[in-house]
Image (cartoon, rainbow, N blue to C red):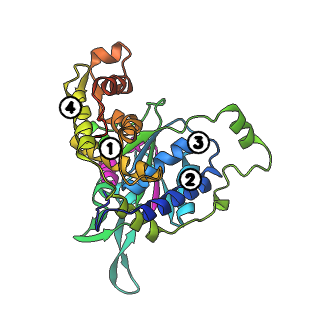
Amino acid sequence: MTTTAGPAVGEQEIAAFRTLHSQVGDAVEAALRGKRPVVDLVLTALFAGGHVLLEDVPGTGKTTLARAVAGALGGVSRRVQFTPDLLPSDVTGTSVYDPRSGEVRFRPGPVFANVVLADEINRAAAKTQSALLEVMEERTVTVDGVGHSVPNPFLVVATQNPIDLDGTYRLPEAQLDRFMLRTAIGYPDLEHEMDVLRPGSGAGAVAAVRTVTDPARVATVAARLGTVHVADPILRYVTELGAATRSDSRLRLGASTRGLRSLVRCAQVHAAAQGRHFAVPSDVQGLLVPVLAHRLVPTREAQLAGTTAADVLAEVVASVEVPRPTP
């Protein structure tokens, strides 16, 4: 995750970020019509220093989303199509011998980009999945004992098809836990789908996405957002929500500490995007499902009863007392 530094973020910085966040969102939405909530979630992960898992069917705009975000940031995007025969070095890069110079040089893989679309990550073998997840966590590729840092900012948008199970390798819970949030694009509503289908529409035109900032500014702003104020009552609220998931009999696995840290970090970014330099309970509540649901594992009995992790989280929110502002 992005580290924090310096004094607490000021109101002018918050106002500047709110404008930047809106501009980036508008630029991306010009290519991905009618999906602003999804765009905002991806931007939350970007500025919080995390990564996104998209569970969606083909043809809903996953590649468009990743490339549009990179275009709006003025950064580089790469797409990796995960297949069963994909090797870890195909993702991270490898050392190659240069016969002209007689030297061994590192040839970077597609992870050396600001936005990486890992398409159908669950089709690759576990070793290849782990190679990507290691880079996501460490932000460094080590080859022959030499470390190579990926660009900053660095956002992985991984996708998996929730319908087709043939030839797939399920992501273990420990690997799912490394994604800051999970969401889905879904099909557009009638009005926006007609707009996408209309001849001459700019929907999906990634090359036309307006560049509104640069990677260096995004990295600087992301680090500053780590100083958005989170009061102790909010931290206690997050802790109690996590404890409630761990004690719920319908879950085999509750929220991890990493998951709760991600929830706090995302709440900071969300608060700043709303123009506040402090987090409030609604920031936490609005992000609870995308940040925590994929980290929870319902029991077999709960699954047979049709209970989902999102259902459990809804009841947890209703049962945990919300902190009130002190007079």
Where residue 172 sits, quadrant-wise, is: top left
Quadrant containing the N terminus is bottom left
Image mark count: 4
Give whichever of 129, 266 is nearer the camera. Answer: 266
**Where are the magenta residues, as a range?**
112-133
Inter-mark Cα distance, 1 to 3: 22 Å
Image: 323 above or below 27: above
Query: Which structural element holds mark 4?
Result: helix
* Residue at 39% from the left image edge and 42% from the top image edge: 283
Is residue 132 located in the magenta-colored stretch of the structure? yes
Query: In the rendered image, which residue does mark 4 sit on?
Result: 243
Name the side, left or right, on which 230 lies relative to 219.
Answer: left
- What amino acid is found at the position of numbered circle 4 in the picture? Ala
Disc 3: which residue:
35
Residue designated by label 1: 263
Q: Earlier in the sequence, mark 3 or mark 4?
A: 3
> Which of the numbered marks, if any, corresponds to residue 25?
2
Q: Quick one: label 3, few (<14), some, or many (20+) residues within 10 Å? A: many
